[in-house]
Image (cartoon, rainbow, N blue to C red):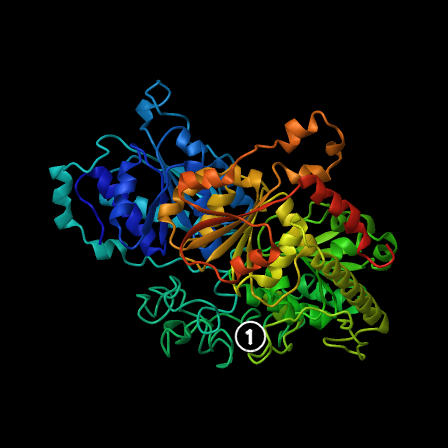
Amino acid sequence: MSIDFRNTNTLWSSILAETLQRLGLTTAVICPGSRSAPLTIAFAQNHNIESIPVLDERSASFFALGIAKKSGLPVALICTSGTAAANFYPAIIEARESRIPLLIFTADRPPELRDCHAGQAIDQVKIYGNYPNWQAELAMPATSLGMLGYLRQTIAYACERTQFPTPGPVHLNIPFRDPLVPVSDIAVEALETQFDIEDFFAGLEPIVIGETSTPPSPPLLRGGVGRGSGIEPSHPLLKGGVGRGSGIEPSHPLLKGGVGRGSGIEPSHPLLKGGVGSGIEPSPPLLKGGVGSGIEPSPPLLKGGVGSGIEPSHPLLKGGVGSAIEQWQKCSRGIIIAGVAQPQFPEQYCRAIAQISQSLNWPVLAEGLSPLRNYAQLNPHLISTYDLILRNGEIADKLTPEIAIQIGDLPTSKELRNWLDKTQPKRYIIHPSHHNFDPLHGRTIHLRISPENLATVVSPQVPPLTNTQSTQVPPLTNTQSTQVPPLGKGGLGGVLTSESNEYLQLWNNTETKVRQAIDQKISAIQNIIEPKVSWLLSQILPAGTPIFIANSMPVRDVEFFWQPNNLKIQPFFNRGANGIDGTLSTALGIAHRNQSCIMLTGDLALLHDTNGFLIKNKLVGHLTIILINNNGGGIFEMLPVAKFDPPFEEFFATPQDINFAKLCATYGVEHEIIDDWEVFQAKLSFLPNRGIRVLELATNRRTDAKWRLDNLSKFAPGS
């Protein structure tokens, strides 16, 4: 127990930290400062929360963002008053736009010391504008039971709002008067004997995540909590959460009329077998007496999903999902677009999309910044070269779709976006959050549902992948083909016409040809060139490796060249606001207490965040940085402004002429220059388990840009 009764500020702050710990918070990132001292001391004394000190506020905020991306759980971020809070702003914007849960606590001076030049006092109330999911200023610290209850409940609500209705940042501004250090106040110390701590915190439980956004994937819907869900038995959602011994009484509203006896759910249902409660106790409370009173016998999201055993008159099938599915099943020219995504449970996510694809017999255009290309065996209709295919106008016209199912954000590809804008298919956007995912302003309908739940509607009978199936995809030879044979009537999932088979086959056959052309061209390159880096990484990284991909050219080369594979590589990125802020710090957050990670970056993105190296001594884990050093902004070489020099080189390319070996030496980071592809592959075949290292590949950005301009439009057949 970490309640500190030494004075008003220590009591207030320790109640705040203890509340968060009981709600399931595991990590706090703390920047040094005087006004935030009560918070810093409270978190440092709470041994159930890992508190990590980070000097630079911008770096700290992106480090917290990376940890939250990886875990799907909110991370606390703490700073002192003044401009310290302003340095959190870029990461808060990214958290909002990429739907990542963060809890920001900015310490502040009390009201009487504002607007009077007291020093280190700025207007911090609603400093982050409209970017937080919710924001408030707490009352001045007090010791009455009523005010402590107010604090507890406000913190609980703030934690909840990091997840609902859509994950994102929450900001609380917290004023403190002196004393800021834990000097004794006899009056406050006397309260300890009157304070029933267990009674005060009774009823606080970790927040149970429902269907929100991806990322993070809702644990209770993505495979369930328990066996086969990918959640460890020690996960906060299982510890002290929903299950026997969690402290939830049988009369708790989550258990009354819940999932279980009388709910109409079969005992073999996934949510009961290997789902919620599996691995906790044979008869956890959620399964005893269950959620079911007052619910119709076949709750759509629990019994076989929407559309499985549900009456046609069910509201979820009336005019919404049901109406859409009817149109999809009748459509002979449909595509699925799987955009950028970093779900908590990538295999379940990929499996769901594959099930939808196989049920409808529609191809899946899979962005490189999603896990789909790394689970290729799940989807026989995976299209990875869509950007290159659509550069051939004749083929693009033949592939014009009538309907497109867009899952989450659109891919990065400008070719794809222009093609969709030109062809104007009816587009269904699949995502459970409230965000608008249609930058093209086309004929779109948002269906606020996760792809996992949609799969149970569209394809309740598609068999799962067995454990005996191979997880290795050998490279294609010149004689091999991934051409799909004609499908019989009915295909894999319903009523299909021969026209739909021909449309699917055209996509698959074109993918095969373009993929072979890319592989043959790039495999023959012996010199160090940027496009080959992402192509090679997709084949050589250890299975399951997390990789953070920096913005600008790396994300585009991954989309162009990343090979489909079955290595279960986990891509991460900051594609909410698409900036280069905090690149290194975010990658370190993902690597912290994770398996060994990779970061793919250019030189400018790394230089923009070199303060991230200061986290080195706090990192528990390993990060290998693959640094493509082309001495400037390579992406600008691909834009029309490159033709106008001056001022292009000085003001757009902005070469920095940095010796990275010396820079790394300053921070005590291992550095090596790589000038041979075999050495590069050897260095990545086995990753260290601690520390940071930089593998630098020097390239010429003009040569790289010319290679792309010369080749990208030539890979499609007939180009």
Would residue 392 appear left or right of 275 to someone viewing this image?
A: right
Would residue 571 appear left or right of 668 to someone viewing this image?
A: right
Question: In percent of the image, x 58 and y 75: which residue is there?
Answer: 304
- Label 1: how many residues lie within 10 Å, few (<14), some (14-19) or many (20+)? many
Question: In percent of the image, x 69 and y 66: which residue is there?
Answer: 322
Would residue 636 appear left or right of 145 to someone viewing this image?
A: right
Quarter of the rendering occupied by the C terminus: bottom right
Residue 155 seen by the camera: yes
Where residue 525 appears, as percent x and y from the top left, is: 70, 55
* Three-letter residue code for mark 1: Lys
Residue placed under numbered mark 1 in the picture: 303
Q: Nearer the viewer, residue 67 or 430?
A: 67
Give the structural element (helix, strand or loop) at label 1.
loop
Quarter of the rendering occupied by the N terminus: bottom left
Where residue 570 appears, as percent x and y from the top left, is: 54, 59
Question: In percent of the image, x 24 and y 48: which residue is there?
Answer: 45
Q: Is residue 87 above or below residue 250?
A: above
Q: Residue furthest top?
A: 116
Count of numbered circles in the view: 1
Q: Nearer the viewer, residue 167 or 310?
A: 167
Q: Is residue 226 above or below residue 83?
A: below
Would residue 336 appear left or right of 613 to someone viewing this image?
A: right
- Rendering quarter of residue 447: bottom right
Residue 163 seen by the camera: no
